[in-house]
Amino acid sequence: MKAFALCLGIALLLLGWAPLTTAQPACPPTAPDMEGPFYKPGAPTRESTGKGFVVSGTVKSAGSCAPIAGARVEWWQANPRGTYDDEHRGTLVSRRDGTYRFETDFPPPYFGRPPHIHFKVFAPGHRALTTQLYPKPGQTEITFDLVVVKQ
Ligand SMILES: [Fe+2]
């Protein structure tokens, strides 16, 4: 019986099956989400596009969890009146420890969509990521790590 179990274990390893007890990867990639029609490249570099809602997090490499310095993070969102404008577009670069932070207005729901902020992340050596953040009404701050996949 022991020999059978050993053979089965070896066979599973050869097939590339992980044991059932293997945990999820520590840093699964951030799920991509729609770009939508309102993206405009070249948003100005700044750390504020409004007041009252602070977004911060770390840009990380999927799998290794290594923080990524020098990643370009762009965001855009509807203004408090529910329309997109240039005042609610920004770009910043992740710090040496991979972190980023900006303050903005809380995004309103619009066209039947829940409150959201769009993101694009361009990290050296990694695939570009387009995603969205969905904060809950009443939140004043949120942590949103941006986990990107190596090229
Ligand atoms: Fe949107």
Image: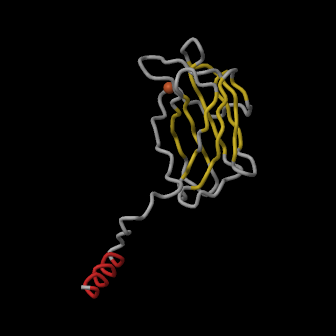
Which image quadrant is residue 51 in?
Answer: top right
In the rendered image, the residue lying farthest to the front is 1
Q: To which quarter of the image does residue 14 belong?
A: bottom left
Q: Is 52 situated above or below 5?
A: above
**Looking at the picture, does residue 70 appear above or below residue 113?**
below
Residue 130: give x, y in percent of width and height: 52, 40
Residue reaching furthest to the top: 81
Name the residue located 55 percent from the left edge and 51 percent from the top edge.
Answer: 148
Front residue of this view, candidates 125 and 138: 138
Q: Nearer the viewer, residue 27 or 46?
A: 27
Q: Residue at x 69, y 24 (%)?
A: 49
Residue 141 image position (x, y, % from top left): 64, 29
What colour scheme has been applied to the protein in the rendered image? secondary structure
119 w.r.t. 50: above or below: below
| Quarter of the image where the C terminus is located | bottom right
For this orientation, the residue located farthest to the bottom is 3
Q: Residue at x 70, y 38 (%)?
A: 92
In the rendering, at what x and y percent does residue 123 appear? 63, 50
Tell me the quarter of the image containing the N terminus: bottom left
